[in-house]
Image (cartoon, rainbow, N blue to C red):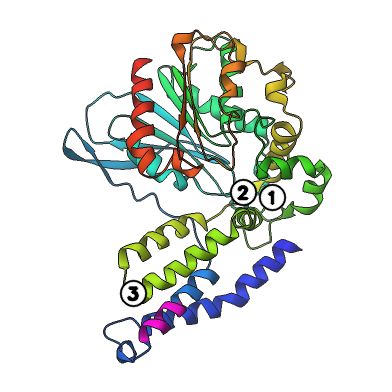
């Protein structure tokens, strides 16, 4: 019923959001006489703020059309390299004959679209051949395509690695560090020729027993049945995935906002002030961020509940109790894939030591194939987006990849 109520709310708000959008244009468009009234800025700013609070946010476009290589602009083409029911493997093909290291960026399936990693991909493109996992909103996947579990996520990563072939490098951001490490562990145990050359783990919950955050505490203070009974809902009839059980994106978004409500309130108030003062660049930066942040997707229920149980409640990966298709996930089998772990000093989602724990699990990697980096004064999003990512972290990853290419 909650999903149906959410859809009803959206329908009720639709006329309001259309009205506020029109009002904002009437008081700001230079061709409108209302734009020259004494309080036009205040009205335009208030209408736009109300519109953005109430509007429905769709999946943003990647908007990556070119990159700079060797001082010249090179065109990009967004190709689908492999399509599976719950994910598309995107290839940002560059118009160049350069043979740079091939990188698979595994985006998180945690409520936001893969486009949240736009800055990550943009910084990698000048020096790498980049592929990205573009997860599909579960409400758009027909129920006939079956369920999707955490084990299926591991199988998807393996399928992508086998499709790309040997000499691939993997970068996993946040949530996928766990299934990526599991996928590579199983490939190593089978001595699969498609084991990647290197794996970079960034801000992920590999061992959530270390420095537990608010996210970890929520998962451990509630029983598994609470998540199953309160957070899982059926997709309404108007979507292709009608009837599918999902963890709705709007619930995940509410959780994100609830973690830092004061910060979001201040950001929206600052946006209103930027509009009043005519600070167009700051206002546009706010729009870009929240266009991405407020665009969420539904997660398959089985995958979400598996993640709660296996990663956050039972700690199966660090305890060595996780089995997939009857085979135990053992990271100590990894001997050919170099490991770089990256954490943010101020990360409030994946606490200190949770990602670096991968080094303890990959016990048979030689010292020359390991590297640890903690980004100072850096939060969770800062390790894959923003100035520190572009100037400090991305160059370190590129150097690590080339040293093991």
- Residue under the point 73% across and 55% down: 234
Q: Is residue 304 left or right of residue 93?
A: right
- Residue 384 in picture, x, y percent from top left: 44, 39
Give SS at disc 2: helix
Q: Nearer the viewer, residue 172 or 391?
A: 391
Q: Nearer the viewer, residue 167 or 349?
A: 349
In the image, the segment drawn in magenta is: 40-47
Q: Quadrant of the N terminus?
A: bottom right
Rendering quarter of residue 260: bottom right
Q: How many other residues sit within 10 Å of disc 1, few (<14), some (14-19) or many (≥20)?
A: many
- 46 is within the stretch colored magenta: yes
Q: Which residue is mark 1?
A: 246
Which residue is situated farthest in the left direction here?
A: 71
Rendering quarter of residue 332: top right
Rendering quarter of residue 85: top right
Q: How many other residues sit within 10 Å of disc 3, few (<14), some (14-19) or many (≥20)?
A: few
- Residue 280 in picture, x, y percent from top left: 31, 67
Give SS at disc 3: helix
Q: Which is nearer the N-term, disc 1 or disc 2?
A: 2
- Residue under the point 74% across and 18% down: 326
Q: Which residue is mark 3?
A: 277
Q: Quadrant of the C terminus?
A: top left
Main secondary-structure element of the magenta-colored stretch: helix
- Residue 92 in picture, x, y percent from top left: 35, 38
């Amino acid at each position: 019923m909650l999903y149906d109520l959410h859809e009803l709310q959206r329908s009720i708000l639709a006329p309001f959001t259309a009205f506020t959008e029109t009002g904002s244009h009437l008081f700001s468009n230079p061709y409108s006489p209302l734009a020259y009234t004494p309080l036009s800025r205040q009205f335009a700013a208030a209408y736009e703020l109300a519109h953005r609070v109430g509007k429905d946010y769709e999946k943003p476009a990647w908007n990556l059309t070119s990159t700079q290589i060797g001082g010249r602009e090179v065109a990009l083409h967004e190709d689908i390299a492999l399509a599976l029911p719950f994910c598309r493997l995107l290839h940002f093909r560059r118009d160049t004959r350069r043979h740079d290291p091939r990188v698979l960026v595994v985006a998180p399936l945690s409520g936001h679209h893969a486009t949240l990693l736009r800055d990550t991909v943009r910084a990698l493109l000048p020096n790498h051949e980049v592929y990205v996992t573009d997860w599909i909103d579960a409400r758009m996947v027909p129920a006939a395509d079956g369920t999707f579990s955490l084990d299926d996520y591991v199988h998807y990563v393996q399928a992508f690695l086998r499709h790309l072939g040997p000499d691939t490098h993997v970068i996993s951001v946040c949530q996928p560090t766990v299934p990526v490490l599991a996928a590579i562990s199983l490939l190593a145990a089978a001595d699969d020729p498609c084991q990647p050359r290197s794996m970079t783990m960034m801000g992920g919950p590999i061992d959530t027993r270390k420095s537990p955050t608010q996210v970890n505490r929520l998962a451990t203070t509630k029983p598994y049945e609470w998540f199953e009974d309160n957070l899982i809902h059926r997709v309404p009839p108007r979507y292709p995935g009608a009837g599918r059980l999902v963890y709705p994106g709007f619930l995940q978004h509410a959780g994100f906002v609830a973690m830092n409500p004061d910060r979001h309130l201040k950001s929206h108030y600052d946006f209103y002030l930027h509009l009043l003062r005519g600070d167009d660049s700051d206002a546009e930066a706010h729009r870009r961020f929240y266009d991405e942040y407020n665009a969420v997707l539904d997660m398959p229920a089985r995958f979400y509940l598996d993640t709660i149980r296996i990663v956050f409640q039972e700690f199966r990966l660090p305890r060595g109790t996780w089995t997939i298709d009857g085979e135990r996930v053992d990271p100590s089998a990894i001997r050919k894939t170099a490991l770089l772990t990256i954490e943010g000093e101020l990360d409030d989602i994946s606490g200190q030591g949770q990602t670096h724990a991968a080094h303890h699990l990959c016990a048979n990697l030689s010292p020359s194939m390991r590297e640890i980096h903690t980004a100072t004064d850096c939060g969770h999003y800062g390790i894959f987006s923003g100035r520190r990512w572009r100037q400090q972290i991305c160059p370190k990853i590129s150097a690590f990849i080339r040293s093991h290419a």
